[in-house]
Image (cartoon, grey):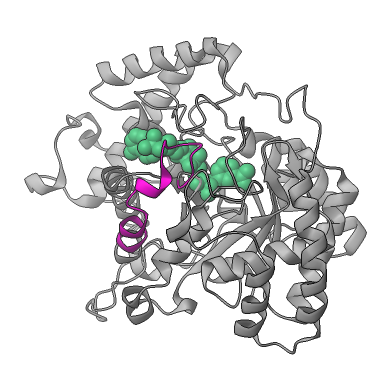
Amino acid sequence: MAPLSATLAPLIMGTATFNSQYNADPYALPTTELVHRALNSGIRAFDTSPYYGPAEELLGRALDTDFVRTNYPRDSYHLLTKVGRIAASSFDYSPAWVRQSVRRSLRRLHTTYLDAVYCHDVEFVSPAEVLAAVRELRRLRDTDGSVRHVGISGYPVDVLCDLAELILRETGEPLDIVMSYANFTLQNTRLRSRALPRLVAAGVDVVPNASPLGMGLLRRRGVPIGGMGDFHPAPDALRDAIHAADQLADANGDKLEVVAIRFALESWLRDGAPVGALGPPLARAPHSDPGFLSVATMGTGERLGVSVIGVSTVDELAETLRVWHSIVDGLENRNDDDDVDVDNEKTSPQDTMPTTLTPSDGLITDRAWSRSRKSHILDLTTQIQSVLGPKWVDYVWASPGPDFVNSLPADHLAALEKAGDVDKSVDALPLAPAAATAAAANAMVTPPMEAVDQGQRDPMEAAPASITL
Ligand SMILES: NC(=O)c1ccc[n+]([C@@H]2O[C@H](COP(=O)([O-])OP(=O)(O)OC[C@H]3O[C@@H](n4cnc5c(N)ncnc54)[C@H](OP(=O)(O)O)[C@@H]3O)[C@@H](O)[C@H]2O)c1
């Protein structure tokens, strides 16, 4: 199997937003439209988790359409999901649950294989549990091919590094992928400063940076308030400091979220390159001119750091993609420095152009615009970090919180026991994914999406009262 970095693209669309944590009613979101627009715009990777309420099903519904089957065959995009986190304070990393969870994800996503499966939020369980889950995922990879690459995700970067090192030591094989979230943002860049050297040394193939907005913290309208109320772990004083940063961005004619998205995505493209991927930043549209060559659709031939974005609306997707396109424009002809001193990261007098001048005015090339914007954003980032001050730059919240106790609901244990019978019969099957997923479907407890409402949903999948993502 080729390494994940050989084909993964540097922009992944996350689906944590397809859940009541971020939104009052995830079923009311235009999730199918978002997925289809993402594919049409050149995004070819989706991140999800069984922990994100109905997100896997909503993503699966969007993919299980004639539109996607006709235009985007399964091997044209990557699906990344997770195992092990059941609810806010419920984790099951047992090999039996790992198997069941993978089968359920296959069924919900209407696929025969998962490009990558993470152990979700590893800091909440013991290293031994993580090791056992990783071994089981690799066993699935090696025996039935339902999992292609194996990794871990979580928040505290030191824990991620410790585990990456431990897994290499214990198994002799490095992790394919380690995802950190909210650790390479305007506010906190520990992923680069503390984690990157250790993860590279531990042989990790890809390190995606998730949550460029710090789970929605770094934006004008403040943290997202969904159906579960205010879940965000940032303390009030940090939120106040972010508000001051927003006013600074505003005074510079920018929106905080746009600065934050651009800083994280653009800087990680370069800084995360040692653990980046080779896929093109934006895939070609099915009917595009094959003769048109661009780094956007061909890649630069070098690794680019991978980011995971999260959006809830068509406008947010459009805004994020607008920023992404402009970042990618800056990759074109990187060695052609007729108007930019690339080596010294200095830009030409274009730098001083007003930020409202756009390429569509015809007065500046896309590439020069992108370079100018990059310089402006880096300058603004420095100013924003001085507004945040030493107290909040690189501040991290506790994960898990002090009150955390892992407790598995009785329903989960009952479902696991019940599924055990099916597990044996499924294991006895030869590699026949459709049959396997159908069998697993009977064992799983998620009703068809059309039938779901808050009252009917299975308690294992219902939104937990409080969440630490
Ligand atoms: N433990 C883990 O494994 C883990 C943890 C975190 C993230 N992830 C993955 O990474 C993905 C990205 O993380 P995230 O969703 O937290 O990303 P994020 O970018 O930090 O935050 C997303 C939030 O920002 C808002 N937003 C996005 N674009 C915006 C824009 N242009 N203007 C204003 N607001 C905007 C969204 O809006 P709304 O208010 O409209 O929802 C949403 O609330 C997740 O979906 C998930 O797949 C994984």
Q: Measuring from the top left, give residue 28's x and y in whole percent.
A: 35, 46
Write the residue at 41% across / 41% down: 25
Q: Quadrant of residue 463?
A: top right
Quadrant occupied by the N terminus: bottom right
Asked if the magenta segment contains residue 327, the reply would be no
Write the residue at 32% across / 72% down: 284
In the displayed structure image, the side of residue 258 where residue 224 appears, left or right: right
Q: Nearer the viewer, residue 313 or 191?
A: 313
Quadrant occupied by the C terminus: top right
Q: Nearer the viewer, residue 216 or 63?
A: 63
Q: Which of 110 and 333 is in front in this view?
A: 110
Q: What stretch is highlighted in magenta?
A: 18-37
Q: Nearer the viewer, residue 441 or 222?
A: 441
Residue 284 shows up from this direction: yes
Q: Measuring from the top left, give residue 240's x and y in whole percent.
A: 46, 11
Q: Measuring from the top left, give residue 27's x and y in whole percent.
A: 40, 49
Vertical side of 168 occupied by 111: above or below: below
Write the residue at 21% across / 51% down: 366
In the displayed structure image, the side of residue 395 where residue 381 appears, left or right: left
In the displayed structure image, the side of residue 267 where residue 254 appears, left or right: left
Residue 115 shows up from this direction: no
Q: Measuring from the top left, give residue 51's x and y in whole percent.
A: 61, 48
Vertical side of 373 occupied by 79: above or below: below
Write the residue at 36% across / 19% down: 246
Asked if the magenta segment contains residue 20, the reply would be yes
Counting labels gives 0
| Residue furthest out toward the front | 455
In the displayed structure image, the side of residue 122 where residue 280 appears, left or right: left
